[in-house]
Image (tube, coloured by chain):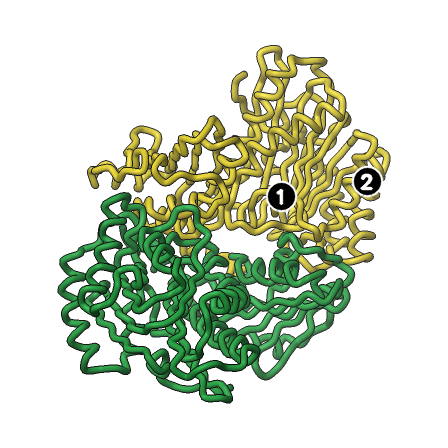
Chain colours: A green, B yellow
């Protein structure tokens, strides 16, 4: 398996294009094949999710249409009609069945879609998509809201199979993948059931382990389509490849958390089980106190210990070990519950790094988990105080 | 029942004093009687909690000693010895039993107490306490950390019984009362079991419904002591009075949330049950997106709906009603799932108020709950990025 360029345009059978006009973007991705999705667990879900879940019932998709700028959420029956209209428009323009179209929306909640705008953008898109079959980056840009950079990842497996994805998501990210969209493609030949199983496992290790602010949106989804153009592939390598693509995108989302200046990666080992380790890891990257300490470059490890303590994970204070690290060095702060002597200079260098690793060993079992988040900054507050209804 | 001045000094049988030297404060409260406590649910607890829980086993206390500036948490066996030493010192100076002393600490985690400082402060305190029996405010100030004002409340019941309390807590407040201390006193005659029962109920409706940042500390406790000096009282009125005192203190804590410029009160009615209503109310005041919208005076009600949706409470999108209000007016934004036409001017006035009420009706049952929080501001980030280990 190796990382490659090209995003989802690298996958055989995918045609993609996107445009952005101010806050309003539209992306269309054509790719026929077996398909599966994972959706937000928010009890209030947007019409786009209702429609897409219906259209996935037969385990197939031929296209995805996604807009940014308006989430079309909490818009009742008219909103459902608009989401259906997006699918119809896509089907008509591309000459495919309505029920083979996935629909996604992201943006402000509680406002109706501007269908006239979407129609005019759609005409422009179709023109572009006929010229440009390498539109992965344009589509990744089209679905951005408060994101500051487009997010793409792609790998090639040893047998030449490709797996790739684009994603958006910046604020309102929490376990359960909220205000987050990701569209994944592979040219492997896989049935919908296998895809669904692989997707859920990969999402649990990646997007569901990202916390920007702990909020959960009403709109978010991860879709995968397998075009089958490269034929069957080794399932174990496929799973590894998919997990790698999802983790790459998840880390990009954490890194691009609203206002973020540091990526925080919390690695918890020695949990009673994986579930406990995941609770602890997610609670660390969710804690506003840990997040603002990282922003202040303050190695305030007491806040990490407190977060682990209230995470719900089984914890024995006398067994915890804790270290802060960056890519090049590591400083142990606590070993088996004992506070270590540390050199301020070493810690200072780590806290100044762009990517900070918080490494916890609970020493209670073999459970492990990794979660990603970002620091809490003045800019997070500014962005979210100003992002208006 | 009426609100009165004087804080805990208004309760017959309470002698209290406190001093503050920079970040280091010390308060001593003498009050003999039956007693009960409620403690953090963080699995890592500070030595002060271990000692105080032991000393409460017989349902009696004669004094409480509390320091600010150092939480004496995650300090192992030496930390436990220090907490015990605080109790011993208090017992010796006041001529009472060691096991009748409650010990509380708040401040930075992972550092040892400066026992020499505490000893010198103690001598000063004893001198003051002999001169000044009305030291409630001094004690409320002594236990402050990032608090910006002391927190006191007191009521007199119709039969002349008094109930009063002081509290501290600003950042790191979450359900389970974290980095929060409150010492409550009454001159009613009540046994420890009744006190414990009344305290748990009042705490669940007050301190456990305050969320500043969702973090939970290792140190926090609410203690109540009944001196019995005013004899028996009507239990129902006592419960109401205690709840009133606790809610008054809880609101002061929310109002004084680190960097806060608005108090947010979320009232949820029509929940399937009280538990569901409490989940929804707490999730609203915990949401960083709701909190930063309030800071930006932005009536972004979509974020409230999203928070209710992921709160875990039973929700039917078509039944939700939602209003924003302040003390003088109210604007309905959603009624039975339908978005209402609103006047920007009315909303603007509400969002400019110091206290903002977010009122949600789930229309699924008779459950109700109220939670308190504050907005997320630049100053929250500044305070927590700079508050150093």
Q: Residue at x 65, y 67 (%)?
A: A368
User: Both on one chain, marks 2 and 1?
Assistant: yes
Residue of label 2: B54
Relative to residue B126, is residue A308 drawn left or right? left
- Report the front residue among A341 and A96: A96
CB of mark 2 within 8 Å of CB of mark 1? no
Query: In the rendering, at what x and y percent does residue A310 appear?
Result: 63, 52
Q: Would residue A296 be visible to someone looking at this image?
A: no
Question: In the rendered structure, the residue with mark 2 lies on which chain?
Answer: B
Query: In the rendering, at what x and y percent does residue A19 appear?
Result: 22, 71
Residue of label 1: B143
* Residue A342, image quadrant: bottom right
Q: Residue at x 66, y 39 (%)?
A: B18
Relative to residue A60, is residue A235 drawn left or right? right
Query: In the rendering, at what x and y percent does residue A188 appear?
Result: 44, 79
Question: In the rendered structure, the residue with mark 1 lies on which chain?
Answer: B
- Report the front residue among B59 and A251: A251
């Amino acid at each position: 398996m190796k990382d490659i360029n090209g995003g989802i345009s690298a996958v055989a059978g995918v045609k993609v294009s996107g445009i952005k006009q101010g806050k309003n973007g539209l992306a269309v991705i054509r790719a026929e094949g077996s398909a599966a999705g994972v959706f937000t667990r928010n009890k209030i879900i947007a019409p786009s999710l209702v429609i897409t879940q219906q259209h996935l019932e037969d385990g197939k998709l031929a296209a995805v249409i996604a807009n940014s700028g308006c989430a079309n959420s909490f818009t009742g029956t008219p909103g459902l009609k608009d989401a259906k209209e997006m699918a119809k428009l896509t089907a008509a323009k591309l000459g495919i069945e309505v029920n083979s179209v996935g629909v996604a929306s992201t943006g402000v909640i509680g406002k109706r879609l501007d269908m006239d705008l979407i129609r005019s953008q759609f005409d422009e898109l179709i023109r572009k998509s006929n010229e440009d079959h390498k539109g992965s980056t344009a589509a990744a840009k089209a679905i951005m809201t408060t994101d500051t950079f487009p997010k793409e990842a792609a790998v090639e497996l040893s047998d030449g199979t490709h797996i790739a994805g684009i994603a958006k998501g910046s604020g309102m990210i929490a376990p359960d993948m909220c205000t987050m969209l990701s569209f994944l493609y592979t040219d492997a030949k896989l049935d919908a059931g296998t895809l669904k199983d692989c997707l859920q496992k990969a999402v649990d290790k990646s997007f569901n382990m990202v916390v920007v602010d702990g909020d959960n949106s009403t709109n978010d989804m991860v879709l995968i389509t397998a075009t089958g153009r490269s034929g069957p592939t080794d399932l174990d390598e496929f799973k590894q490849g998919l997990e790698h693509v999802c983790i790459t995108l998840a880390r990009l989302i954490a890194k691009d958390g609203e206002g973020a200046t540091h990526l925080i990666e919390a690695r918890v080992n020695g949990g009673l089980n994986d579930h406990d380790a995941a609770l602890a890891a997610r609670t660390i990257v969710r804690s506003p106190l840990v997040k603002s300490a990282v922003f202040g470059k303050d190695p305030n490890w007491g806040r990490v210990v407190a977060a682990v303590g209230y995470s719900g994970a089984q914890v024995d204070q006398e067994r915890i070990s804790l270290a802060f690290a960056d890519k090049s060095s590591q400083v142990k702060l606590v070993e088996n519950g004992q506070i270590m002597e540390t050199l301020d200079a070493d810690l200072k260098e780590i806290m100044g790094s762009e990517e900070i690793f918080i490494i916890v060993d609970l020493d209670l079992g073999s459970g492990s988990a990794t979660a990603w988040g970002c620091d809490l900054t003045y800019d997070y507050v500014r962005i979210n105080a100003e992002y208006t209804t």
